[in-house]
Image: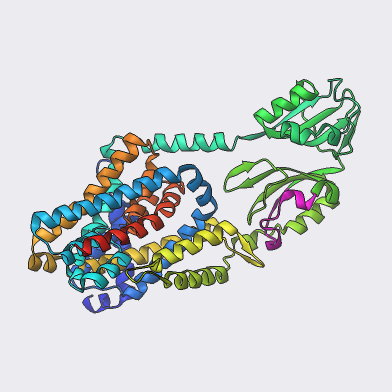
Amino acid sequence: MSDLLQSPYFALFVIVALGFMLGRIEVKGISLDVSAVIFVALLFGHFGVIIPSSLSDFGMVLFIFTIGIQAGPGFFSSFRSKGQSLVMIALVIVATATLAAIAMKALFGLDAASTAGILTGALTSTPGLATAKEIAGNDTAVSYGIAYPFGVIGVILFVKLLPRICKIDLENVKREMAENTKNEYPQIGTRTCRVERASVIGRSIADLSLRVVTGAVISRIKHDDSYVMPSGRSILQEGDLIKAVGTESSLDKLEQLVGERITEDLPLGESLDLVTAIVSNKTLVNVRLASLDIPSNFNCTVTRIRRSGIDLPPTPELQLKWGDKLTIVGGKQELRELTKLLGNDAKKLSDTDFFPIALGIVFGVLIGRVTLSFGGSFTFSLGLTGGVLLTALLLSAKGRTGPIVWSMSSSANQLLRQLGLLIFLAGVGTSAGTNMVDTILNNGWSLFIAGAVVTVIPMIAAAIVGIKLLKVNIFDLLGTITGGMTSTPGLAAADSMTDSSAPSIAYATVYPVAMVFLILCVQLVAGL
C-alpha cells in the first residue's frame, strides 16, 4: 500500500474517496461536504504522501475558470447593485488582518519578515508571499508555512459554522432568494380576453403598440370561427378573442385596454402549431431579438424565453444566449424554417467544446504573468488565480467572439468545476500537511497562534459588519469573506452550501480588490 500511495494518481483518488466519505458525516446538522477532502489530504501529507504542485495548479485553474464562466453573466450587474457593500467588507477583512498582524508582531516580538509571512499565510495569498519575499527576504516563507495550514482550515470551518453561530436558517434564506428572483423575474402566464373597448376596435396591433404599452405578447386571435396568427397589421374587431402571454401585471394592463378576461382557452387550430426551440446556432449569440424580426420574416411569435431555469419576456432588446429555449407559435412550415435558423440541436448544446476552455485558460495564465511596475517601489501582477478569474469573467460576460462561444452547459461546468476542485484540495492539503507538525514544534507555537489570530479576527469583523451593519445576504457574505481572505478552498465550502451562484459572484466581485489591497498592506508590514 505504501508503494501504491507514492503514485500521485492513486493517492489522489484515495484521498478524494475518503474525503467524500468523511464529508457525508453530519454532526448536529453540520457536514464538511467536499471540503472534507482537504482534511484527509492534510493527514496523508503528514505521512509523506504528496500530490505534485503542477497537478494541484491544474485543478485550481479548472476550478477558478469554471467559477468565472458561471459568475461572468451576473458579475457586472451584481457589482453595480451590491459591489460597494461587498468591496467594503473585503477592505475591512484585509485592513483588520494587517492590524492583527502588527499586533502579533508587538505581542510576540516578531521581525518584519515573520510578520509579513504570517499575514500572507493567514490569508493564503501566494502573490502576497512573493511581494513579501522580494522586500523582506526568504525568511518570510517559514512563517508563511506555519500560518498557511490554519489559513486554509480556519476559513472552511468558519464558513461552515457561521450560519449556525448566528442562528441563520439557510433554508429560509434560500426561499427568500427564490422569492426575490421571482420578483425580479415575475412568472409568465397566459390570459384570454374579449375585445370590447371602443378605443381598440377597428385598430391594428401595431397602431395600438400593444407590446410597448402592456408588455404582453399576443400569441393568437380568434375572429368569428377562425384562428388567426397575429401580426402588426392584424385589426381587432369587436368580439374577437385574443390570447396573450406575459407577466401578471402586463396581462392586467392588456385586460384593461381591450376588454374583460374570459375562461375560454384558444386552441391552436389546424394551421398553427406551438414548439420550443433551443438556440444552438453560435452566430445568434448576443443577437437582439428585434434584429431577427421574427413576426415579419417568419410570421411567427415568440411568447417566452427560458434561460437558466427562469422565464423571460421576449422584449425586442433582449439578447439571445447559448442554450436559450424559445417558445414559438406559428405556421408549421414557418416554424420549421425558424427552428432551423435557431439551431435547435440539443446534442450540440450538451457537447463540451474544449477549444474555448483551453484558449480562455491560456489567455488567463498569460494575463496573470503580466507585471506592472509603479515608480520602481511597487510592482503588481494578478498571478495565476487572478489572471484566470478575471479572464473568465470578461469572456463569459462578452458571450461570443466571432465563432467562439465563451460558455458551456451547466452540466459540463459542474463536472469540470468539481473535478478541478477535488484535485486542488488534495494538492493543497498534502502540501500543507507535509511539514505542518514538525514546523510548529521546531519554530514554536507563537507563530502558529499568531497566524490563527490573523485568520480568525478579520472574518469575525467581516461577519459583524456584513450582518449587523450592512444586512448582507448570508451567501453573499460567505462569498465575500472567502474572496476577501483570497481563499479558494473557502469558496468551495460556501459553494457546497447552496445551488445559487451568489457565493461565486460575490467572491469574484471582491477577490481582485482584496488581492491588490493585500499586496499594498504586505509592503507596509514588510517595511516596518
| Colour scheme in use | rainbow
> Which of 499/462 is in front?
462
Q: Quadrant of the C terminus?
A: bottom left
Q: In x, y percent, where is residue 274?
A: 76, 44
- Is 273 located above or below residue 347 in the figure? above
Query: Residue at image x 69%, y 34%?
Result: 246
Q: Is residue 269 left or right of residue 389?
A: right
Q: Residue 64's image quarter?
A: bottom left
Left or right: 157 in relation to 414: left
Q: Quadrant of residue 184?
A: top right
Looking at the image, residue 161 lies above or below residue 240: below
Give the vertical position of 397 relative to 185 (above or below). below
Residue 489 image offset from top left, x and y in percent: 33, 58
Position of residue 471 measured from the top left corner of the image (x, y, whole percent): 37, 35
Foreground: 224 or 132? 132
* Residue 291 shown in magenta: yes
Q: Is residue 148 visible?
A: no
Q: Which residue shows up at 20% across the image and 69% down it?
A: 140
Residue visible at 30% across and 64% down in the picture = 128
Residue 45: x percent and y percent? 22, 69
Query: Is residue 284 shown in magenta?
Result: yes
Question: Is residue 432 something one can see in this rendering?
Answer: yes
Quadrant in which the N terminus is drawn: bottom left
Left or right of 251, for residue 196: right
Q: How many marks on residues? A: 0
In magenta, the rendered stretch is 276-293
Point out the residue furthest to the front here: 375
Residue 412 is left or right of residue 517, and the answer is right
Residue positioned 31% across, 62% down in the render: 519
